[in-house]
Image: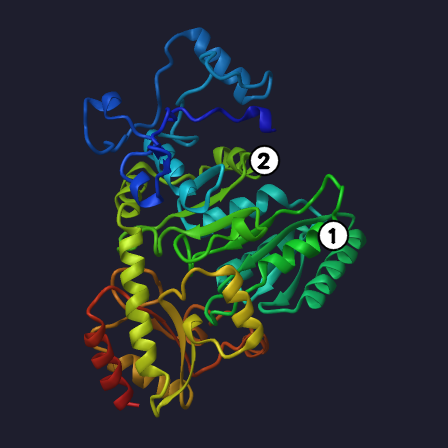
Amino acid sequence: MTDSIPPRRMAKPALTTLGGRKLQPSTLMMGLGYDPVLSEGALKPPIFLTSTFAFRSAADGKRHFEAITGIRPWAEGDGADGLVYSRFNGPNQEILEDRLAVWDGAEDSLVFSSGMSAIATLLLAFCSEGDVILHSGPLYAATEGFIAKTLSRFGVGYVDFPAGAEPAEIENALERAQVLARAQGGKVAMIYLESPANPTNALVDIEAVATARNAMFDGRESVPPISIDNTFLGPLWQHPLEHGADIVVYSLTKYVGGHSDLVAGGLSGAKRWMDPVRMLRNTMGTICDPNTAWMLLRSLETVELRMTRAGENAAKVCTFLKDHAKVEGLGYLGMIADARQQDIYARHCKGAGSTFSLFIKGGEAESFAFLDALRIAKLAVSLGGTETLASHPAAMTHLSVPAARKAALGITDNLVRVSIGIEDADDLIADFDQALAAV
């Protein structure tokens, strides 16, 4: 399968160092993967709204389809590489993928029409009937539902363990997954993590998971990749590939897009993991569209600035909230009380982020009163945008999660999820203060 993957059509020698200095991602976002000479000198990449691309010759067309069908391997420079149809690739998408990979130091990246299309394509690419997925909990509700409700219809099982689990608990969960896989006649196909978890902000020990996986599958060919949804902290505040993960998952809708005006998803990792996903994406057509890719290229130029400002704002807002009489607690990574979680944070994270859980004293009624009283912050279910958002997971994004599982995962009626934006921090504090007064 890996022989049927074309080389990057838009790739060119890139300026990644200067005078012996390695250029930083914020600099590379301004030009990596794009040559203005190829587009009439346009400073920024045009939007390529084309569905099909012309071959230079019939022989090139034949070589391309020989390679894409696996009749022979790709050979760079033989004319088989290039663009053919926008369900497979396109200039905007390829430039975006080149730049997205930079943030995690990944060999390759793929972009998708949504975060869930990225997740679904990823899991389908690696899972077969009888296989088992080991995953942390909680997960984004749609991810958990896709594993438990959709993949289970096709004979794919799962075993889960709580975020923050100790190494022994992780090892035990992996052993249970292996036992289940053998009983079903399959394999452990994927270890899927989400850290910080949605909506509790609980952290998973990626290094402990990698250690357990490597010990169990030492020397075996069918090693399950470790994938992690890094949406809450990435791409600035956590780099999971440095800690043993193989694939990083993003809802690019969130911090990378950052303006609440697009929907997209992304995966980053080594080519050996990206290649089978790319092949399935070619078949299913879950690739990001050119216009959205162009908008994401715009957003990547300012992602560091936006995330830095939002993170600074969150620290100020949480400093105000932590001692408020109507606040029961905070799930903010900059104020971790649990020793195990603090240890994971110190090893894995480069910042506390700007999305956190706020526990109101009371229950649903008190939480609703707070949400309804907000004036600057908007009542909406996304995160990572320029504006501050707040929502009630138990009654909204995680409503479909069974009550017993919500209770076990700490998704309570007094939990409000907050995503801090780039407004003035003192204005946000004033808004939270008056909204809490309404409780």
Specify the amino acid type for callout 2.
Arg
Towards the viewer: 250 or 237 = 237
Say which element carries label 2.
helix
Q: Residue 436's spot in the image, x, y percent?
A: 29, 87
Q: In the rendered image, is residue 286 in sight?
A: no
Q: Residue 71's spot in the image, x, y percent?
A: 60, 17
Report which residue position mark 1 lands on.
215
Say which element carries label 1.
helix
Residue 183 in the figure: left or right of residue 340: right
- Mark 2 and mark 1 lie on one chain; the one further toward the N terminus is 1
Residue at 41% across, 41% down? 102
Estimate how packed mark 2 is, as few (under 14), some (14 to 19) or many (20 or more) residues with alpha carbons within 10 Å. Answer: few
Q: Which disc, if any, is residue 272? A: 2
Specify the amino acid type for callout 1.
Ala
Q: Residue 382's spot in the image, x, y percent?
A: 35, 63
Q: In the rendered image, is residue 136 in sight?
A: yes
Q: Quadrant of residue 234?
A: bottom left
